[in-house]
Structures are given as C-alpha cells and as structure tokens.
Amino acid sequence: MSSSARIGVLALQGGVSEHIEALTRVGAEVVAVRTPEHLHGLDGIVLPGGESSVLDKLLRMFELRDPLTALLRGGLPAYGTCAGLILLADTVLDLAPGQQGLGGLPVTVRRNAFGSQAHSFETELAFAGIDHPVRATFIRAPLITEVGEGTDVLARLADGGVVATRYRNLLGTSFHPELTGDDSVHEYFVEMVRAAQNG
Amino acid sequence: MTSENPTQSTATTRVKRGLADMLKGGVIMDVVTPAQARIAEDAGAVAVMALERVPADIRAQGGVARMSDPDLIDAIRAEVSIPVMAKARIGHFVEAQVLGALEVDFIDESEVLSPADYVNHINKWDFDVPFVCGATNLGEALRRITEGAAMIRSKGEAGTGDVSEATKHIRTIKSQIRALSALNEDELYVAAKDLQAPFDLVVEVARTGTLPVVLFTAGGVATPADAAMMMQLGADGVFVGSGIFKSGNPEARAAAVVKATAAFNDPAVIAQASRGLGEAMVGINVADLPAPHRLAERGW
C-alpha cells in the first residue's frame, strides 16, 4: 500500500486540464497551483506545456517563482512537459527577451527547435522504464541539445534527438503525453513521487 | 524534417488541436507592426495576430479588407518567438494557401475581413496549418469544426470596444452546450437538426459537456475586467484586437489584460491590474452600428 501522492499542476496558462485529468486517472490527488499557498504540502509538481515566455512572466507576477525554485532545489519531484521542460532546463537557447527559467535540470534545450506549427508532429517512442512505446505529441516543441553529467536520457527520436531526460528529482519531456490518452509517463512520474515519499 | 521519417505524422487533428490547447489561459493580441509584436510578447501574449489594420481602423476606413502583405507577416514572425497567426477572408482558400506557404502557426478564417465566398467556408482539412474560426452560437461552432477548425472563438463585435456582443456569443454557446447535456439520446436527433450540425458531433458535445476544441472569446474586449468576465463565463482564453493598441498606454494595458486573464477569479488582482492604465479605446456602442456594419453577421 502506497500513500496517496499529492501532486500540483502549475495552473497559470497552457495545457493544465489535460495534466489534471491524466494524474487523476493514475490515482494522484491533484492540486491546481495558482498562488504560493497552493505549494504547501505538495509531494510533486507538474509544469505543463504552454508558452514558456508567458509562464515565466506569470510565475514572477504571482510570486511563485522564488518559492517554487526553493522547493525544486530542496528535492521536490517535478515533471516539465514542453514549456515546463524549458522552465526546468539549466540552459535555454533562443529565449524571448528577458525570459529566465527555474533551472535545476542539467541540460541545454532549444526552444521551437522543429520550426513553425506545420512541423509539429506525433510519433511513438521507446521510453526507458516504460515497457511499451509511448505515444508522444510534439507541439512547436523544444529539443534537448546537450545533456549534463549524471542526467539520464529516457527517450530519443529516430534521428537520435533527445526528447526526455531525468536528473534526480527532475523529469522533463519535449513532448506532451497528456494530449494522447497514454498515461504511462504520468504513472512513471507518480512512481518517482512515491519513491521520494518513501525514501 | 518530419517528411524524412514516416513514423512521425504532421498535421494530425491532435497536433492541430494541441497547439490551441497550449494557448489556453492566454491572451492573443492583434498587432500591425513588429514594434507592436515586441510589446505584445514582452507583456505576456501567448500569440500575436499579424494584421495590416486593426478592426477599429478597418471599420473606420471601410473598403475591402484582405489578407495582410506577406512582408508584414514575415517581419512580425522575425520579431517574436511566440506563435504568429494571420487572417484569411471567409472562403478564400488561396489566401489560406498563401498563409500556409508562409508557415504562420494558425490561420484565422475571419469575419473581420471582407468575405470572399458568401456560400462556402474554407475546407480546412486540406491544410497542414490549424485554423481558428468565429462563431456566434453552437451550431455555427460545430459547422466550423466539421469543416476542420481546430479552435473556435466566439465572434463578439470586433473593433468596437463594446463587450456586449462577446458576452452574448460566449453565453449562447455555453448555454446551448449545457442544454444539449440535459437531453436524452432520443432528443439529440432533433437537436442536431435544429443546430444544423452533424449528429455525431452533437452527441459528442452532449456526452462530454464541452466542445472538442478550445473556445476563446473575441470582439470588443478592451479592459482587464472584460477579459476576466469572458474567462468567468467559460472562455479558455481571449483575443484582444483594437483594445490594446487603440488605448492610451498599450504596454501597461497589455500586461494588465494578461494578468487579469490568468487570475480571472480573483477580484483583488483584477482591481490592481485595472489601476492607472490611462485611456481605454474610445469605442462604439454596438447598438449604434447599422446592421450592414456588424461584422458578426458575416459567416453562417
């Protein structure tokens, strides 16, 4: 019997409801995070897709940036999809003027690495730790161009491009599993959260 | 790059609707120059609509309004990293082809421009780029989705700064969805006939209680409180056209509308966002517009 995992979804902008539904389906207790108070008592947090430049501004506007950064540095498990990955990455190429991430995940990420929306795509990927191909949707997606020491590569495109990584408590994917109805990456993250609770 | 790999599928319905999903909770701003696009991105817009004239000027200047010059669209794309949308005339599939060739991120088949076809809308399934279309009621929204729209915006009355039509259209769409959900299965056949929409889509909306695509609001939003009201009425996000760059202080107003849209349920935040914004766009009361000048009546 594992205890219930209480997982926040940053709910300022973007594909929030899809993550809330996926996490609910895999048995997590979900909290929509809009204010610093909502961060209290979380066992993990999901940073959704959206526009990373907008999420960055809203995190500062609503005074979430500093408390959230402190929680991540303190080991709170976090999963960033697309814009959420950009927020977690230590280095981001092609940032909007003034944009800053939260950092912590030792990777370099290029924003909009595939070009305009006409080049957005869906595919299936082998994902280390998941026993079947994961359905993945890439929307004006970032690509992980460099991976730091100690960071695991969990998934690659057919051409070798890195699209999922994990470093300690931080998980990031270029793609959106929450748009596909395939909940296996959310299950993987909930397992990360439970392991951290029990560890 | 994706064409090299047959296992990667571009332009699927999921990929098209997915971009709209990522815009939720955000503000899409009309811009007519790269400098305005810079202001919009700096203020936190999730996307910009690249135009030659904002609706208020189209209304004031009259004449036929068409797709923007590709040079202008390219210049705006070069300025910002957020998605860039552009408008094609209703039914003008070649303007849409041109916008597709320019690789804009979204095409708005828009009643703000002069219609090119008074019978047919564009067959949007033919395109790799997703489309957003306007609607004044649920039937119109479902017809646009049937034609391939990946996102709907309630029309409102563009270029007026009068939010009353936006309110009417979002209320109508949401209340028609709620009414469908209350019907039993036998009654959905007649509901589909009344809505002039395909039965399967009507059943899907009745079952899920929501459109299968993202629903934004447009047409007359001019203040942070206007934007927050649209969100409280159930919009997934807002388009602001003339309301920002026809106001006294576009930088401050743009940021304030973004803030109020994100915190739409918090009156204290909306109050704070509403302070010191300078003059709002002067606006026109929709009731003072003679019927032939009402843009929302274009499209069917």
Image: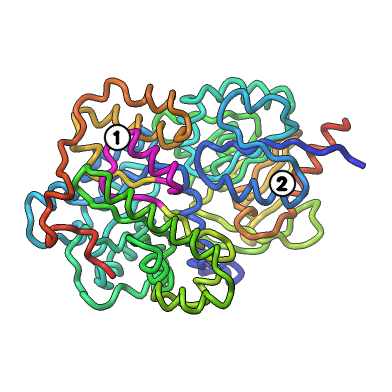
Whether residue A149 is visible: no
* Residue drawn at the location 67% of the way across and 54% of the way down: A156
Query: How was this image coloured?
Result: rainbow
Residue beneath label 1, please?
Answer: B223
Q: Amino acid at mark 1?
A: Thr
Q: Secondary structure at mark 2?
A: strand
Tag shown at residue B13: none
In the rendered structure, does residue B136 fall within the stretch colored magenta? no
- In the image, residue A89 lies at what x, y percent? 60, 35
Let me know if marks 1 and 2 both belong to one chain: no
The part of the chain drawn in magenta is B216-237
Whether residue B291 is visible: yes
Q: In the displayed structure, does residue A17 sit left or right of residue B220?
A: right
Residue beneath label 2, please?
Answer: A153
- In the image, residue A90 lies at what x, y percent? 59, 31
Q: Chain of mark 1?
A: B
* Residue drawn at the location 20% of the way across and 59% of the way down: B295
